[in-house]
Structure formats: structure tokens, C-alpha cells
Image (cartoon, rainbow, N blue to C red):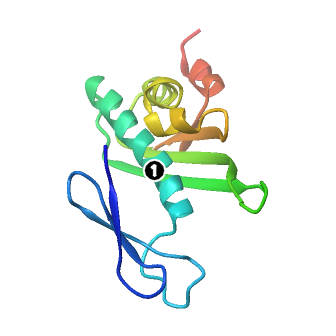
């Protein structure tokens, strides 16, 4: 895979493009007139986007209907030499629709632990955690066990 970046002004505004040719605006968040996302914002978006695609794919294969999908990714940065890399990221996944809670949690687990290339690339350097919500309910292994008939 190859991407390109072309500078558009005398400051920090770039247009990035991958093999599909779709432009992505990138800028320095400290500028007075920001014209794009910062590289660190794009990294958080990449975590959320990669996992979202995996989770929707798995749920579709399980014939689950996702009527709405929203994800929020919050990164915590540390200090390393003069840089401020992410040391952790937390992903909150909000699903709507007639979705089995166990299937939603399993899809997220598969994505974060096996499928998502972005998460796998960051493994060992960034601790990534997640929560899953289906129709407003927080889904956990305990909440799924409580739903099962005794």
C-alpha cells in the first residue's frame, strides 16, 4: 500500500491520498485556521474505523441488523523524549437495532483481538480497551449471563 501527501499552503495543510484516490485533509491542530484533522486525530479515527468495519462485517454474517453505529475513541497521551505518543485508547461502541448482546460483544472481541490491522499494529505500544452498548444498554459478560435463563 502506498499513500501520498501534497502540501497545499505555506504552513501545514496537506491532502493525503491512498490507492483509491479519495482525498483526506491533514493539518496542524495548533494553527489558527485548521483545515484538516491532525495525524494523531487520524490515528484515533483509524482505530475506530477499522474496528467498526470488522464489527459490522461480523454482525452482518450473523444476520444481525445494525440500524445505527456510532463510535467514540478517546486517547491518553504520554511523554516519550520530545514526542507525546498515545499510551492508551478507549473505544466506546454504540449499536442500535435488533442485535443479540452476546453477538455484539463477540464481534467486538474478534475485531480487537484478531481482525483489526490497526489495533494489531499498535499492540504492545498502545493499550486499547473497549465498551459495547446495544440500544443504550452496556453489554458485559456478566450482563449476558444474567439474561440467560437459569
Q: How many callouts does the rendering have?
A: 1
| Quadrant in the picture for residue 131 | top right
Q: Which residue is mark 1?
A: 46
- Categorize mark 1 by other alpha carbons within 10 Å: few (<14), some (14-19), many (20+): some
Q: Residue at x 27, y 30 (%)?
A: 60
Q: Is residue 96 left or right of residue 120?
A: left
Residue 65, horizontal then vertical, whole percent? 28, 36
Q: Is residue 112 left or right of residue 80?
A: left
Q: Is residue 140 left or right of residue 114?
A: right
Q: Residue at x 31, y 49 (%)?
A: 2
Residue 95, horizontal then vertical, whole percent? 43, 44
Q: Residue at x 53, y 25 (%)?
A: 113
Residue 39, horizontal then vertical, whole percent? 51, 63
Quarter of the figure with the C terminus: top right
Q: Is residue 53 left or right of residue 139?
A: left
Q: Residue furthest left?
A: 20
Above or below residue 2? Residue 8 is: below
Viewer can see residue 136? no
Quarter of the figure with the N terminus: top left
Q: Residue furthest bottom?
A: 32
Q: Residue at x 64, y 38 (%)?
A: 129
User: At numbered mark 1, what does the secondary structure look like: helix, strand or loop?
Assistant: helix
Residue 143, horizontal then vertical, whole percent? 61, 27
Nearer to the camera, 139 or 81: 81
Nearer to the camera, 74 or 60: 74
Nearer to the camera, 92 or 87: 87
Viewer can see residue 44? yes
Nearer to the camera, 65 or 60: 60
Amino acid at each position: 500500500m502506498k499513500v501520498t501527501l501534497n502540501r497545499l499552503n505555506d504552513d501545514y495543510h496537506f491532502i493525503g491520498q491512498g490507492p483509491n484516490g479519495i482525498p483526506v485533509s491533514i493539518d496542524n491542530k495548533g494553527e489558527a485556521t485548521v483545515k484538516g484533522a491532525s495525524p494523531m486525530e487520524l490515528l484515533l479515527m483509524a482505530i475506530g474505523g477499522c474496528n467498526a468495519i470488522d464489527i459490522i462485517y461480523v454482525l452482518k454474517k450473523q444476520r444481525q441488523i445494525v440500524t445505527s453505529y456510532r463510535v467514540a475513541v478517546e486517547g491518553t497521551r504520554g511523554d516519550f523524549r520530545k514526542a507525546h505518543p498515545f499510551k492508551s485508547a478507549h473505544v466506546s461502541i454504540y449499536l442500535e437495532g435488533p442485535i443479540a448482546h452476546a453477538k455484539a460483544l463477540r464481534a467486538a472481541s474478534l475485531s480487537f483481538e484478531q481482525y483489526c490491522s490497526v489495533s494489531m499494529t499498535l499492540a504492545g505500544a498502545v493499550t486499547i480497551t473497549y465498551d459495547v452498548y446495544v440500544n443504550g444498554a452496556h453489554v458485559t459478560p456478566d450482563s449476558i449471563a444474567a439474561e440467560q435463563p437459569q
